Image: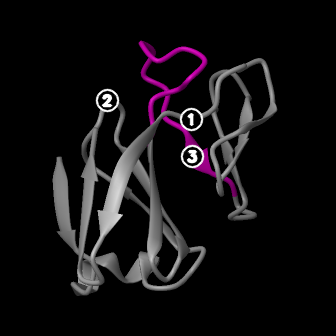
Amino acid sequence: NLNLNINNPEFFDVDNTGGWMYLNGGVGGILLYRQNFEQFTAYDRASPFNPVSDCQIEVAEDNITITDPCSESMFLITDGSVIQGPATQGLMRYNTYYDGQTLMIFN
């Protein structure tokens, strides 16, 4: 479980809609994405194709897709769905709750 004060300057990258950043936590780390002013999505960075490997998903340069460098699978950043295989499952998501100041990320 993570509790983050989003108004803290260290979270500047997710200050606006479409912003994202990497966090420690989860199995392979966490990718935090801001859907809109009130909603965040948190994905585990472990590869959904081979979660026991040391591969971590990465946001592509277009800031719209996420890539798995080991399997070359691609996912949409907005919902974690697969847009190119060989992965058949979307990204693992954590629950989030945002009260306007504190963001909670939890199972």
Q: How far is mark 1 from mark 3, CA to CA? A: 12 Å
Considering the numbered disc 1 on the image, is that residue within a helix, a strand or a loop? loop
Residue 2 versus residue 107 in the image, above or below = below
Q: Nearer the viewer, mark 1 or mark 3?
A: 1
Q: Residue at x 72, y 60 (%)?
A: 64
Q: Could you give the CA–CA distance between mark 2 and mark 1, rounded to whole angstroms?
A: 12 Å
Q: Pointer 2: what residue?
A: 27
What residue is at 25 percent from the left and 87 percent from the top?
A: 7
CA neighbours of label 3 inside 10 A, class few (<14), some (14 to 19), many (20+): some
- Secondary structure under tag 2 reads loop
Q: Which residue is mark 1?
A: 91
Residue type, mark 3 in image: Glu
First along the sequence among labels 1 and 3: 3
Q: Which residues are magenta?
A: 44-60
Quickly name the residue at label 3: 58
Cα distance, mark 2 to mark 3?
15 Å
Q: Is residue 94 left or right of residue 81?
A: left
